[in-house]
Amino acid sequence: MIKPYNIEGLSCAACAVSSQKILSKVNGIETVRVNYATHTAIVESESDISIEILNERLQKAGYKLLEKNNDADKIHRATELKKFKSLTNELLLSAVFAIPLFVIAMFLHGIIPHQIANYLMLALTLPIMLWSGRRFYITAWQQARIGQSNMDTLVALGTGTAFLFSVFNTFFPEVLRSSGIEPHVYYETAGLLITFILLGRYFEERAKRQTSGAIEALLGFKVKTVSLIVDNIEKQMPIEAVFEGDFVIVRPGEKIPLDGEIISGQSEIDESMLSGESIPKFKTVNETVFAGTLNGTGSFTMKVTKSADNTVLSQLIKLVEAAQSSQAPVQKLVDKVSAIFVPAVIVISLLSGLIWWFFGPEPQLTHAIITTVTILVIACPCARQLQSWWGLAEQQAKAF
């Protein structure tokens, strides 16, 4: 049994790998494929497994599966729109504080007294860390609880370490000065990193919304109610109540609800949504009509030949969804690299710190801390921006 789901809580390719590992450990599941680009999960199992059981395993890591059907898709799209607006607000707030932070750090630090500049940058960085950047720290904590890591872990470590190190140097500058080291602060590093990462994620989400617009446009061609003939009486019924062999009346200007065959009447049908041909086709008795196409000035009665799930329109929607859920071979490689990149960076930073601690010059502890912080801060933007821009490029490619 193969079942598709929408999945929430993914923030990078490593999240897809992490959620895929969690689901693959559930008894009865044969294969799992989680796609970060489209936030979908394809689960193949021996028998039907309750979504509650799957979510029970996922919730500790901050992920959640949602049923994939028309109603659930509408809720999912509304939720995604709400998240996109929240991301936009976080980015705007971050930019408002990041711009003066950058100006002070780059141009005014020598003009404004050193300690006052540090306090000003601390005040500007706090809203970015506590509001705009909180998503990274929440996700990092959720991943740590289950012994996993992702790109948000690296962002949280890099920016958090830079911020805490700067706070320490702001309030206790004499500690490093006593060792002959200037107590530099890195508030602009933490604040600007979060801002640029949010900017990359914003472009990524916007591109994702553009590609999903193709499916939404196709869904817009679907009809919700039909004029169904029941015991020679015309009744307005939901599309779900219509079966193969039923008779439906289509009036001028209405969309054709299902694939079928005209049994009486005639009209011109606009089939441009399927064929791209702008000139309407004249159709009469015994000719086939398709769901989603637009009836012209005539009126006719049709016999339904395909259920809602088997129409040409439904198959077209499924093909587009399958194309969006597919992964290019290079993306599979990126997912594998993402799964080991974060632990590798953490290990390298710790090893570097230990080497400086045991074999470096005096003051050894100070050099060890600075080296560890430097590696985490440098690795954070390079990896996350590369992953974000790759996601953007993949979404743009699928849009065409």
Image: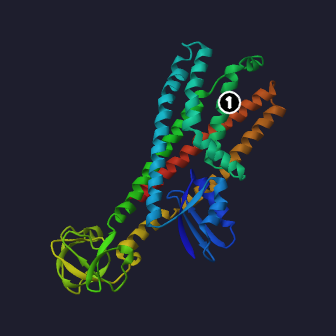
Front one among 319 and 290: 290
Within 10 Å of the Cα at label 1, are there few (<14), some (14-19), or many (20+) other Cα atoms? some
Q: Disc 1 marks which amino acid?
A: Leu
Q: What residue is rendered at 55% in x and 71% in y? A: 3
Tell me which residue sits at (57%, 53%) in the image.
10
Viewer-nearest residue: 138 or 95? 138
Q: Quadrant of the N terminus?
A: bottom right
In the image, residue 293 above or below residue 340: below
Identify which residue, 165 or 259, lies in the foreground: 259
Describe the element under mark 1 as helix, strand or loop: helix
Q: Is residue 359 above or below residue 286?
A: above
Residue at the image point whose x is 42% and y is 53% from the top: 209
Up-down: is 25 above or below 373?
A: below
Q: Quadrant of residue 212?
A: bottom left
The spot of residue 283 in percent (x, y) is 19, 80
Percent x, y for residue 310? 40, 78
Write the residue at 57% across / 29% down: 125
Res. 71 visible in picture: yes
Coloring applied to the structure: rainbow
Identify the residue position indicated by label 1 in the image: 164
Looking at this rendering, what residue extends furthest in the left direction? 297
Q: Position of residue 263 (x, y in %)?
A: 23, 86
Residue situated furthest right in the rendering: 358
| Residue 379 visible in the displayed image | no
Q: For residue 48, which quarter of the picture?
A: bottom right
Quarter occupied by the C terminus: bottom left
